Image: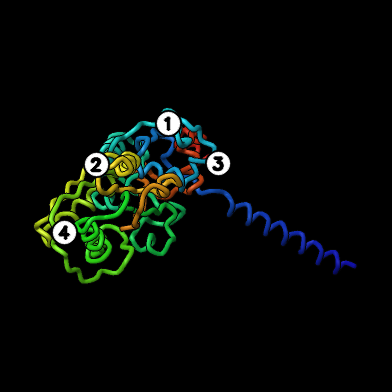
Amino acid sequence: MRGKNILLALIILSGLAVGCSAKTQSVKEQVEGLDKLGKITVIAREDGSGTRGAFAGLVGLDKGAAKDTGDATRSDAVTAETTEEVVSKVEEDPAAIGYISMGAAKDLTQEKILKVDGKEGTTENVEKGTYPLSRSFYLAYSGTLNDLEQDFLTYVKGKGQDIVSESFVPVAKSSTFLSNQAEGEIVIHGSTSAAALLEQLSDEYCQINPHAKITVEQSDSTEGLNDAMQGKCDFAMASRELKDYEKELLNYEMIAKDGIEVIVNKENPLEDLSMKELEEIYTGTVSAWQELNEK
């Protein structure tokens, strides 16, 4: 009898030990210094931005959002019209958080890039599909391409992938390109995130085909797509998925894959945020940095 009681006691103590261990492991590690940052300054791209649209869709800000806003980004968020403006605002404010293209993040010196769900926004992780904030760049157009436009698109999807691979993830293998040397002008409108890449691709193509002239004008993905539908440009640059009506009215080709990097001021002690925490920060459910330690 005594032996049975001892065995029962050991089982109970073992269970308590396991329970205590599990409880200890479930407690989130506290990050020192968050309390000094105060209220979170949320930096968001402007309405119509492809980066904003992609970020909102991936994080879940587009669920149940009001029709007039398009997503549930908190109403007091600071709007930035360009990538450079996002970077500048984050650099100036220790409590700020923002998001930018992976291609632009490689030049940062004064800001900190956070991991998301424990993953870094590298080209390798984007290519493998393990980085949660991954998206694609598209060239969209209306109707049938002329000889020059088709030649340029063939270059972008072939030999041009060498340039894509310098800062982004290529979507096809580079291949030998023989231009048809067509003459004329191409006008490209749209995404600021994709503009630098398209400018580089255009410059390289025009060296191969000196009879061509290509103009790249930055606005945002939505405005670029609207311009393509209205015949104001030959190609639209889009850094988000096309909406259903846009897909019905336009042809489109994926030209690169990109990651969206989350950046904070270098004084911020954080190294990682989960997708859930990003959603809570951008909707305002979490409004102060210290609240991340209290969840």
Residue beneath label 1, please? 39
Residue 266 visible to the viewer:
no
Image coords of residue 273 (percent x, y): 45, 48
Q: CA distance from mark 4 to mark 3?
A: 52 Å
Q: CA distance from mark 1 to mark 4?
A: 48 Å
Residue beneath label 4, please? 205
Q: Amino acid at mark 2?
A: Gln
Residue beneath label 3, please? 295
Residue that extends furthest to the left in the rendered view of this protein: 210
Q: Residues within 10 Å of mark 3 (few under 14, many from 20)?
A: few
- Eye-nearest disc, 2 or 4: 4
Is residue 161 placed above or below 284 in the rendered structure?
below
Is residue 81 placed above or below 2 in the rendered structure?
above
The first of marks 3 and 2 along the sequence is 2
Asked whether, in this view, residue 275 is left or right of residue 229, the answer is: right
Residue under the point 33% across and 36% down: 94
Image coords of residue 221 (percent x, y): 33, 43
Kind of element beneath mark 1? loop
- Eye-nearest disc, 4 or 3: 4
Residue that extends furthest to the bottom in the rendered view of this protein: 176
Q: CA distance from mark 3 to mark 2?
A: 41 Å
Residue that extends furthest to the right in the rendered view of this protein: 1
